[in-house]
Image: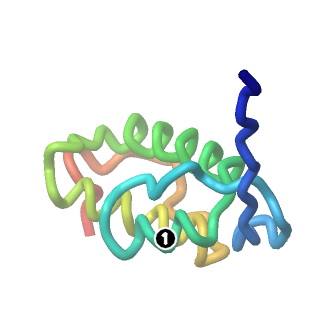
């Protein structure tokens, strides 16, 4: 029996501005998850995972806190689509939970 080969799906990555391998599925539900799935490559998403880990650790985010989740989603959107990279990681952390506004 012949083994079926998986066709590599590509996406025009908004972050790298080139055709690259796509994510296998939306990373999370909702509008932003669909946008990431349709416009971000798996390479760019891997970079985001590394950045998110740094942000969570640096700011001491409690991911059970909706404010921390919202902050991380805002940072993700900025990272992929805003061109600014998001919140700085250097400097003092504002405390536990979501960053102070």
Q: Residues within 10 Å of mark 1 (few under 14, many from 20)?
A: some
Residue 66, image x, y percentages: 16, 57
Residue at the spot 38% in from the left edge and 41% down from the top edge = 56
Is 21 left, or right, of 23 in this rendering? right
Q: Residue furthest left?
A: 65
Quadrant of the drawing holding the C terminus? bottom left
Along the line of sight, which residue is nearer the eye, 22 or 53? Answer: 22
Residue 1, image x, y percentages: 72, 21
What's the coloring here?
A: rainbow
Residue at the spot 50% in from the left edge and 73% down from the top edge = 35
Residue 34 vertical position relative to residue 6 in the rendered view, above or below: below
Residue 42, image x, y percentages: 66, 49
When asked about the image quadrant of residue 39, the answer is bottom right
How many numbered marks are there? 1
Along the line of sight, which residue is nearer the eye, 77 or 5? Answer: 5
Q: Secondary structure at mark 1?
A: helix
Which residue is disc 1 drawn over? 77
Residue at the spot 19% in from the left edge and 60% down from the top edge = 67
Residue 31, image x, y percentages: 36, 75
Residue 30 vertical position relative to residue 8 in the rendered view, above or below: below
Is 67 left, or right, of 88 in this rendering? left
């Amino acid at each position: 029996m012949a083994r079926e080969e998986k066709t590599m799906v590509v996406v025009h990555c908004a972050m790298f501005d080139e055709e690259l391998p796509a994510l296998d599925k939306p990373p999370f539900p909702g509008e932003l998850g669909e946008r990431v799935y349709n416009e971000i490559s798996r390479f760019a998403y891997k970079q985001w995972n590394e950045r998110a880990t740094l942000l969570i650790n640096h700011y001491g985010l409690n991911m059970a806190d909706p404010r921390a989740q919202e902050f991380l989603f805002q940072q993700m959107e900025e990272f992929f689509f805003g061109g600014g990279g998001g919140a700085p990681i250097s400097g003092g952390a504002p405390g536990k939970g979501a960053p102070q506004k």
